[in-house]
Amino acid sequence: MMRFQNKEHIQMSLKKFLPIMSISIALSLILSYIEFLLPSIGVPGVKLGLANLIILMLLIKYPLKVPAAVNILRILLAGFMFTGPIAMMFSLAGGLSSMLIMKLATKLKVFSNIGVSVAGSCIHNFAQLIVAIVILDTFNIIYYIPALIVSGIISGVAIGILTTIALPRIEAAANR
């Protein structure tokens, strides 16, 4: 059944979430750009996923619509500004699938921020692998799976630790 919202409720939602979303989009886009400038280390195409720091914090604190909007807009803007349409397809597949898994993991309340981040990072890598299989029309790249698991764990742990450190500090600063 569809729930209708009155005009005042929609305006309150915009007043509450628009500043958070605007700042989050800007920060995640800056982190995406920084990561774009860094060379790929080790496995081609594997990056830390710095923008996911912002997305994970939003997933922990807000309803799914907030991080979803931020993530989609960040991916589209980064794609148009510096990565291009092919990278945008990979980013959308990885970003949306990882975000859904991370939101589910936060709802279960059995995983730490690190566990949630590792799950999201690994799913992100697998979603991108699926896109690569479809684009290249070959399964010959599945040998890449061990490297994707290792890189997913490493980047997931790093982003999870950064989230665990940053989130309480951001909350404390916001409450001053």
Image: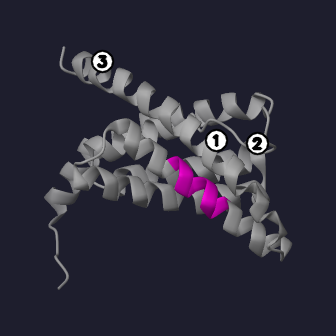
Q: Residues within 10 Å of mark 2 (few under 14, many from 20)?
A: some
Q: For the residues marked 2 and 3, what is the alpha-carbon distance in whole angstroms? A: 31 Å
| Amino acid on which the number 2 mark rests in the picture | Phe
Q: Are marks 3 and 1 in contact (CB under 8 Å)?
A: no
Q: For the residues marked 2 and 1, what is the alpha-carbon distance in whole angstroms? A: 23 Å
Q: Is residue 92 visible?
A: no
Q: How many marks?
A: 3
Q: Residue 42 in the image: x percent, y percent?
A: 79, 35
Q: Please, is residue 55 above or below residue 131 in the view?
A: above
User: Quarter-wise, where is residue 115 in the image?
Assistant: top left
Q: Residues within 10 Å of mark 3 (few under 14, many from 20)?
A: few
Residue at left 22%, top 49%?
109
Which SS class for mark 3? helix
Residue at left 22%, top 58%?
10
Residue position marked by numbered label 1 in the rendering: 151
Q: Is residue 125 magenta?
A: yes
| Sequence-earlier tag: 3 or 1 | 1
Q: Is residue 25 left or right of residue 147?
A: left
Quarter of the figure that contains the C terminus: top left
Question: Residue 169's mark?
Answer: 3
| Sequence-earlier tag: 2 or 1 | 2
Q: Is residue 122 magenta?
A: yes
Q: Which residues are magenta?
A: 121-128
Residue at left 68%, top 68%?
130
Quarter of the figure that contains the N terminus: bottom left
| Amino acid on which the number 1 mark rests in the picture | Ser
Q: Residue 100 in the image: x percent, y percent?
A: 41, 60
Q: Main secondary structure of the magenta part?
A: helix
Which SS class for mark 2? helix
Q: Are marks 2 and 3 in contact (CB under 8 Å)?
A: no
Residue position marked by numbered label 2 in the rendering: 82
